[in-house]
Image (cartoon, grey):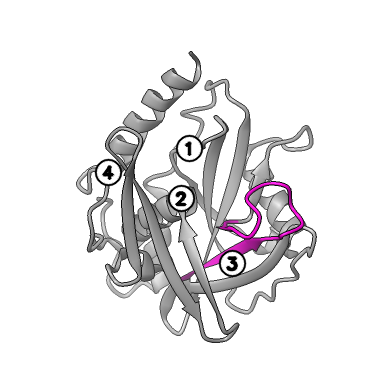
């Protein structure tokens, strides 16, 4: 795990200090798969770390109604993975790029469509009011990041070779709705929660909690080799 900042630092400063140590820089820039990015928007509310998630509109052709992070495929306007994440977040929920403090990029994940998805972790203001694009997003909600480390409201099932498919349920009292977070979004949420909070998940995971980045790197390269066949 990364070195700890001074104890007197704010929650935000502590998390920034920890997460910056995991930034991948341009390490995987030579991988030749179609690219996409997601923004993992963190915020501090009531002295607790939260994360923002969206629900895909039922108007969309794929993955309709699923919970996800703002994001999408890279296009010709984007100069980097970060540009992609920021552009998509602005298009989907009205988040201005100049109100986003990017902290790091984590090891990419290859999704079921063989697209290389780069997580861009950032902080946004707790006062941000989403303006969802109804053609793409039906709901926006926040929840405490530690929700992804608890055994309550969690289940998993094996898939692939030695991998687990995670599911979380979250009941939003403000929206009076219940959401299911699963798949790539759940996997990424667990990893970010573990890295940011420094607490082990209270359930079985498929990465090495003593060296999570090495585990992610190993799985990425194995998946990449398979995707090129």
Mark 2 touches mark 4? (CB < 8 Å): no
Between 9 and 199, the one lying in front of the other is: 199
- Whichever of callouts 3 and 4 sits on the residue coming sooner in the sequence is 3
Residue placed under numbered mark 2 in the picture: 183
User: Where residue 82 sits in the image (x, y, percent)?
Assistant: 62, 44
Q: Which mark is residue 174?
A: none
Q: Position of residue 157 (x, y in %)?
A: 32, 50
Indicate yes or no whether the magenta region holds residue 67: yes
At a point 62% along the width and 28% down the height, the residue shown is 34
Disc 3: which residue: 124
Q: CA distance from mark 1 to mark 4?
A: 14 Å
Determine the residue positioned at 80% across, 59% down: 135
- Residue at the spot of label 1: 108
The location of residue 107, given as percent across then percent down, is 43, 39
Helix, strand, or loop for circle 4?
loop
Precedes in sequence: disc 1 or disc 3: 1
- In three-dimensional space, the C-alpha distance between marks 3 and 4, rounded to whole angstroms, equals 28 Å
- In space, the residues marked 2 and 1 are separated at their CA atoms by 15 Å
Of marks 2 and 1, the one in the foreground: 2
| Residue 153 visible | yes
Disc 4: CA contacts within 10 A as few (<14), some (14-19) or many (>=20):
some
- Who is closer to the viewer here, 161 or 100? 161
């Amino acid at each position: 795990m990364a070195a700890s900042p001074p104890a007197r630092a704010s929650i935000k400063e502590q998390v920034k200090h920890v997460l910056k140590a995991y930034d991948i820089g341009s390490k995987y820039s030579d991988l030749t798969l179609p690219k996409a990015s997601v923004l993992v928007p963190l915020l501090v509310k009531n002295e607790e770390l939260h994360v923002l998630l969206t629900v895909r509109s039922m108007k969309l052709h794929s993955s309709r109604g699923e919970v996800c992070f703002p994001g999408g495929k890279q296009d010709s306007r984007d100069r980097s993975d970060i540009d992609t994440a920021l552009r998509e977040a602005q298009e989907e929920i009205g988040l201005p790029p100049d109100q986003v403090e990017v902290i790091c990029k984590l090891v990419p994940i290859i999704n079921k469509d063989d697209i290389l998805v780069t997580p861009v972790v950032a902080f946004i203001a707790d006062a941000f009011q989403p303006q969802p694009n109804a053609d793409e997003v039906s709901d926006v909600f926040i929840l405490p990041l530690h929700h992804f480390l608890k055994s309550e409201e969690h289940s998993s099932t094996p898939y692939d070779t030695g991998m687990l498919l995670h599911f979380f349920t979250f009941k939003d009292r403000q929206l009076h709705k219940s959401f299911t977070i699963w798949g790539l979004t759940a996997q990424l949420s667990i990893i970010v929660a573990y890295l940011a909070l420094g607490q082990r998940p209270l359930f079985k995971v498929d990465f090495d909690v003593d060296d999570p980045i090495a585990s992610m790197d190993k799985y990425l390269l194995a998946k990449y080799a398979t995707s090129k066949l």
